[in-house]
Image: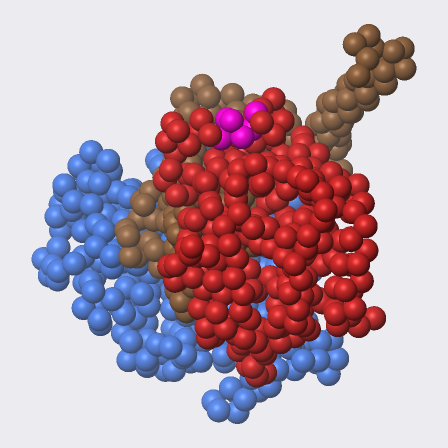
Amino acid sequence: MYKQESAEQKEYLRKLKAKKRLIVILRLLLLVFIIVFWETVTRLNWLDPFIFSSPSRIIKTFIRLYSEGSLFSHVWTTLWETVVGFLLGTIMGIVIAVILWLSETCSKVLEPYLVVANALPKIALGPVFIVWMGAGPVAIITVAVTVSLIVTVLEVYTGFLETDSEKIRLVQSFGANRKQILTKVVLPSSFPVMMNALKVNVGLSWVGVIVGEFLVSKSGLGYLIVYGGQVFQLDLVMTSVLILSILAALMYFGVQLLGKWISEKY
Amino acid sequence: MKIMRCLVLLSLVVLLILPGCGTKEYKEITLNEVTHSIFYAPQYVAINKGFFEEEGLKITLVNGAGADKVMTAVLSNQADIGFSGPEACIYVYNEGKEDYAVVFAQLTKRDGSFLVAREPMPDFKWEDVRGKFIIGGRKGGVPLMTLEYVLKQHGLIPGKDVEVDTSIQFALMGGAFLSGMGDFVTLFEPVASSFEKEGNGYIVASMGEASGEIPYTAYYAKKSYIEKNPDVIQAFTNAIYKAQQWIEKNSDREVAEAIAPSFPDTDLDLLETVVRRYKQQDTWNKTPVMKEEAFNRLQEVMKEAGELAEFAPFDKIVDNSFAEKAIEKIK
Amino acid sequence: MVPAVVVENISKRYHTIDGEVPALENVSFEVYEGEFIGIVGPSGCGKSTLLSIIAGLIEPSSGQVSVFGEKVTGVNPRIGYMLQRDSLFEWRTIYKNVILGLEIQNQVTPERLQHVEYLLDKYGLINFKNHHPSQLSGGMRQRAALIRTLAVNPDILLLDEAFSALDYQTRLAVTDDIYKIIKKEGKTAIMVTHDIAEAISMSERLYVMSKRPGTIKMAVDIKFDIENRTPLSSREAPEFRKYFNMVWKELDVHV
């Protein structure tokens, strides 16, 4: 390796940087274009602003909510329900996957049930949960958890099964017991799969919570969507959807960063 | 009657299997109803007794499950005619939609829900809910607004003198009450009566009686649709008026039998009980005409609930011309 | 003197729905402490199965294996098993990889760790302690795998085609290396390979197995007129050719 970078190397790096900058600029331009297009199209009435809302109307609604002081409480309600549902769904999912891996009998017995449970639209059970647990955040979080739980279990368990059998044979040759195989080989090598499950669960938890709020809520972003629809204030609906998307994206990136941090530490 | 039923069944089959062919001069209409309830008996009479067919209409009935969903279907052209609370039309007009929805026929003139308690309360007074918990329905919907209106009229402030839950979706209110939530719940029929039958609750008051005349459910379509299809609207209104008259003239039992095909899971006695109750309360409009004072009372209720900033003009939102023509034509 | 390993009439039959598959048939031999034994045979003759049985990972259908006089009933810490692939954990540093066996056997003591440091230093990996496997060459990884096996101080080493994954040149260098390490540490070794030349260059005694169901066809004592022979020097010895032909003829090789 040359300590002194050659002119060629410098040029290569410069081109790389320029390309990266170009992509960032294009992304911003695209965003600006979408906003301008949307606003124009609804002002000219090519698209009905009543139904589609527009960036200016959304900003107005946002400001209104903020000045009423209700913005924070709605956002917070939905946010904490989602985070709790997400954590529960992910942790329980991984624990169940571990149990399935530890007991082959267990997993063989439960296999068809899991497949059916996975295919079942859990959202359809929403009303059942509400009658069972009463209307409130508990039912909403339960909907969020069930939506992400089975998927997590299956994905993580499959990831476990795909562990390199040579590595397992290796630790067995040292006399490792099942628990050691789990902690020393299966879990570390399945880390990418588990991170993936986490990322998927971000989206699923949001869906579950919003659906739960559709059924039962008096506050939250899902509630605003329902209420806005009820009184035909579609700006409210759009604003909530937008805030939702931003929060979901932030959560996703947060999880991604967490994954990077963990893999760097260990 | 049996022949009529066969005809209706046959035409529905034809409608499903041979779209657009074999149906002589029938115009196919998609009607989106806010929910499926005995509360709307005249509509099912019109369907089952062939009044729509007499007027040359084939009705496809869709359950919208919510006033906003019905209106959405109408605005997005998924349904020709919507059937729900007219407040949806007021909201849409006020929010500035240009091609807004116009009401042309009213069906019910009172709230159709009942206050259900956990124990029978034969001497129920509204004062009895002081300090208690009522599952009332969602904010922005008329059932809740009517409840709050009635409570305020009896000197009870929602949130202060009585707890009213507004978090539960319409379809799940009964289920929540069953799971042990609340002391009271407002329910439509046939749910209220079936709760009573199962011993899960007892009807103690009628919201319709308590609130006075409010146009509760009506038929509407987009302004542009009405302008383009006045004959369809007229035919529809005629059929409704025929049904309204038929109910006036016939016994509760006969009405129950007429609507039975639309409620296959409800037994005839229950149907009859509910029909009788609604008739006694003068729930149904005798003609499709909507009175201005009733319309304004609805807006009063909405304003009280904080959902209406300014009144919408009656003559823009309601068009009684079709109803009046129906009354003239059909004697 | 108790032999290090005694293999007595080992047979193994695999059971599947389609029927029974005999893998090994009456295999018997002895290995004395400090010896380097080679086993060659055609593909599928059961060589690896035999090693797994000696290691205690598989149970034989009949017969028994004893290690220093004790019957083998499961994995025995006195036996180290080196597999074909180094299977180093990419998520661990080299250091953490080589102490893996110690972790599993709960032997992470200061003496053991000192021994590991000694091995790493002696065999040229001390500067790569905190690197990850992906940063090492094939030969270095193999050395690391060997150190991992040696870290738990086994008396007997089983090498199951341990060098097949390397390219030819690396393989020559690595086998030479590893032979020297094993001899220096005074370990007993049983190596399975399909490379006849490799087997002859490293072993003091060579067993040739038949095709499936595997059994021992021939035992060859390998003596070179060299002091302190190494694999590379053995290959150049005049007797090498003789042994090679002897073994080659005996192998049931089907093309």
| Residue nearer the viewer, B121 or C203 | C203
Q: Position of residue A52 (x, y in %)?
A: 64, 38
The chain coloured brown is A
Q: Which residues are magenta?
A: C116-121
Q: Quadrant of residue B35?
A: bottom left
Closer to the camera, A249 or B18? A249
Q: Colour of chain B?
A: blue
Question: Residue C30, image x and y in percent?
Answer: 52, 62
Residue at image coords 25%, 66%: B195
Would you say residue C213 is visible in this rendering?
yes
Q: Image height check: is A252 above or below A168?
A: above
State which chain is coloured red.
Answer: C
Question: Against C169, is B277 above or below?
Answer: below
Where does the image place residue B306, in percent across and percent down from the top left? Answer: 38, 33
Q: Is residue A115 above or below residue B214?
A: below
The residue lying furthest to the front in this view is C225
Residue at position x 76%, y 59% in the image:
C243
Query: Residue at the location (21% across, 50% down)?
Result: B182
Q: For residue B40, which quarter of the picture?
A: bottom left
Q: Is residue C244 above or below residue B314?
A: below
Report if residue B76 is visible in the image. no
Residue lying furthest left: B123
Farthest residue toward the right?
A: A8
